[in-house]
Structure formats: C-alpha cells, structure tokens
Image: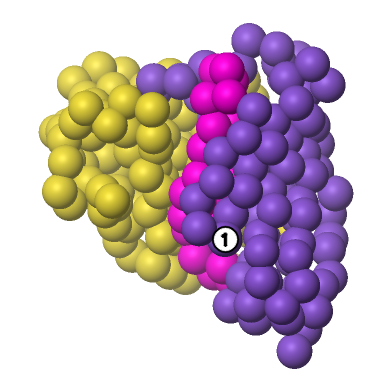
Chain colours: A purple, B yellow
C-alpha cells in the first residue's frame, strides 16, 4: 500500500537552514505537498510540487524531488523561531483524490 | 487562499452523548470535503470523503453509524460523533476542495473533542 515516511524530529538554530526529508512509495503520485501544523491548529499548505518537476522555490522554501528514489525534501532558508512546528509531507494523485500523509517532522528552532 | 472554518474549536462532553462538528467553506463552493482524525503526535488519518448531495465514503475501519457525515450543501459538511466514548477523544480536522481549486485541499483549524 501507499506509505509516506519522515524523520520525526529536527532541531536547528535560528538563522540556519533546515532540511526536512520524506520518502514515499506510490510512484503514481502526481502531486507532493508540504504542510505546516502549529500547536492546536489545522494544516497550512506551504507548497506543492508536480511530479514532473525536480525543484520548486518559493521565497525561503525550496522543494527538491527525486522521482527515481521517491524522495522529497523541504529546505527552509534562514530558519526563524516562528518556523517551529510540525511539517507533514503528503502525496496524492491530484484533483480531489485522497491525501496520504507522513507522520510529520517536528522542527524546533532555538534562538 | 480559500478559508475553511470549523465549529466548535473545542468541545467537552459526557460519555454517551452525541457531538456535532461543522465544517464550512467560507469563500468557495466545496464539491468535496474530507474528515480526518489526528491523535496526539500522530499523523492525520482520513476517516471519510463526502461529496455534496451524496453519501460519504468511509475508510476501512471507520464505523459509519458512529461517525455520521452529512454534506448537505456546497459550503457545509457536518460530522456527528454518536454515543461518544473516551476513546473517541481526538482532534478532528476537515478539509475542502472544489471551486476550480482542483489540486488543493484547504484545511479547517480543527476541533478538539474530549469525552469524559
């Protein structure tokens, strides 16, 4: 079945870059997403990448996709304390199809 | 981006009572709404998918009679937890898709349910 794996925890210092990694198994995934969840809140879509792309950059966020290895990463440049949250990667076939989430990576940014 | 609201944001109820959670798309018509459940420090688990005007499609292992979903309009879906028990305590999150925003789901802020 479909599976999405993430490391559970990442700790960085303010100003450093953060890299959160994700692997997935469904090669038919069309869209891959990164969501951010702050404590007690819902999910906020940060960015997504279409499966025929290798990279997408959006301000401080850079998404890299290695489709051959089914590996997705999110790089946050100049990480701030406000970036502390849980980050979920997710995959879907697009449209209104089901999202399959990883377990989330808790990012802790220390001053 | 599109806005999805949930009400209530948190609820505490006694065991055996029923609780209704509303999910509304505020500025677009949601053809499809999804209900997720999230346990502490866990990922989101899809419970069901509902399309406006039709019966919800439940994921394997989710009791249809316990978690009643109604998607009566393009802007409102409700989840009713019937005869709630302490093990139903969780964070329930809805998401909505539609209105031409075909490759995104927009998430509500979630509802924290605590059953005593």
B105 relative to B88, above or below:
above
- Which residue in the protein does label 1 denote? A60
Q: In this view of the protein, which residue sits in the foreground, B58 or B102?
A: B102
Question: Residue A34: within the magenta?
Answer: yes
Where residue A69 appears, as percent x and y from the top left, is 83, 21
| Residue drawn 39% across the image and 34% down it | B104
Tell me which segment is drawn in magenta: A30-53
Q: Could you tell me what secondary structure mostly forms the magenta stretch?
A: strand
Quadrant occupied by the C terminus of chain B: bottom right
Apparent side of residue B76 relative to residue A79 in the rendered image (left or right): left
Apparent side of residue B47 relative to residue B111 in the rendered image (left or right): right
B9 relative to B62, above or below:
below
Question: Residue B40: within the magenta?
Answer: no
Where residue B16 appears, as percent x and y from the top left, is 49, 54
Element type at marker 1? loop
| Residue drawn 58% across the image and 54% down it | A61
* Extreme-bottom residue of the structure: A111
Q: In this view of the protein, which residue sits in the foreground, A76 or A43?
A: A76
Where residue A66 appears, as percent x and y from the top left, is 75, 26
What chain is tagged by disc 1?
Answer: A
Give residue B45's quadrant in the image.
top right
């Amino acid at each position: 079945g479909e599976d999405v794996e993430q490391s559970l925890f990442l700790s960085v210092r303010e100003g450093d870059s953060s890299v959160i990694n994700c692997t997935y198994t469904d090669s038919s995934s069309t869209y891959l997403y990164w969501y951010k969840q702050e404590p007690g809140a819902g999910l906020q879509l940060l960015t997504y990448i279409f499966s025929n792309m290798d990279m997408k950059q959006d301000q401080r966020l850079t998404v890299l996709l290695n489709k051959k290895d089914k590996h997705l990463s999110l790089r946050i440049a100049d990480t701030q304390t406000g970036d502390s949250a849980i980050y979920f990667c997710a995959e879907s076939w697009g449209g209104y199809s089901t999202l399959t989430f990883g377990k989330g990576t808790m990012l802790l940014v220390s001053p | 981006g599109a806005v999805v609201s949930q009400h209530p944001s948190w609820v505490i109820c006694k065991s055996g009572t029923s609780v209704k959670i509303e999910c509304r798309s505020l500025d677009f018509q949601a053809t499809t709404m999804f209900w997720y459940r999230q346990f502490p420090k866990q990922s989101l688990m899809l419970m069901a998918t509902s399309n406006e005007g039709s019966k919800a499609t439940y994921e394997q292992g989710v009791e249809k009679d316990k978690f009643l979903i109604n998607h009566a309009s393009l802007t409102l879906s409700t989840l009713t937890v019937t005869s709630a028990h302490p093990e139903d305590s969780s964070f329930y999150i809805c998401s909505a898709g539609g209105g031409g925003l075909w490759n995104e789901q927009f998430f509500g802020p979630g509802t924290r349910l605590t059953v005593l």
